Image (spheres, rainbow, N blue to C red):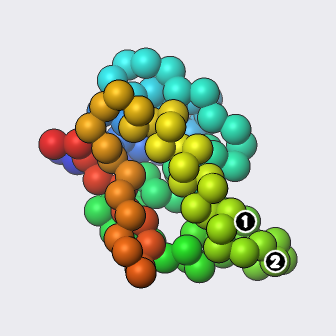
Amino acid sequence: MARESSDDRLVVGELVMDEEAREVTRGGEIVELSRTEFELLRFLMRNPRRVLSKAQILDRVWSYDFGGRAHVVELYISYLRKKIDTGRPAMIHTVRGVGYVLKPEY
């Protein structure tokens, strides 16, 4: 099953997020995330296999009053990739001209 969820747990492939404990693991290994990285990953994990635009991500993770540019999304996606995908099959994918998608590795 690619995604299962309970009240405080999201699962996409071997990536598991305990929202209440604010812990993330991939393959049983703890992944240390900043608050913003956690919020970005939570949004991706709540929408697995769905391509999310930079605008959608900015609105959801940074909110309307942030006034930031899309480059901040690219920057934080790169941070997440280093922490989640390095040395493993990629789960975070770029859809050129559209946005980003989180997919199970299998």
Give how far across and how far down residue 88 sits, in percent: 31, 31
**Residue occupying image coordinates x 52% and y 58%:** 43
**Residue occupying image coordinates x 44% and y 72%:** 99
In the foreground, 65 or 1? 65
Whether residue 26 appears in this view of the structure is yes
Give how far across and how far down residue 46 sits, in percent: 44, 57
**Amino acid type at image mark 1:** Trp
In the foreground, 21 or 15? 15
The secondary structure type at the circle numbered 1 is helix
Mark seen at residue 67:
2
Marked residue nearer the N-terminal end (2 or 1): 1
**Residue occupying image coordinates x 33% and y 23%:** 27
Q: Is residue 76 above or below residue 30?
A: below
Q: Is residue 19 above or below residue 70?
A: above
**Residue occupying image coordinates x 58% and y 69%:** 57
Give how far across and how far down residue 93 sits, in percent: 35, 58
How many labels sit on residues? 2
The secondary structure type at the circle numbered 2 is loop
Would residue 103 be found to the left or right of residue 100 on screen? left
Crowd around label 2: few <14 · some 14–19 · many ≥20 (10 Å): few
Crowd around label 1: few <14 · some 14–19 · many ≥20 (10 Å): some
Mark seen at residue 81:
none
Q: Which quadrant holds the C terminus?
A: top left
Q: Is residue 64 above or below residue 91?
A: below
Which mark lies nearer to you, 2 or 1? 2
**Amino acid type at image mark 2:** Gly
Measure the alpha-carbon separation of dots 2 and 1.
9 Å
In the foreground, 95 or 1? 95
Q: Which residue is mark 1?
A: 62
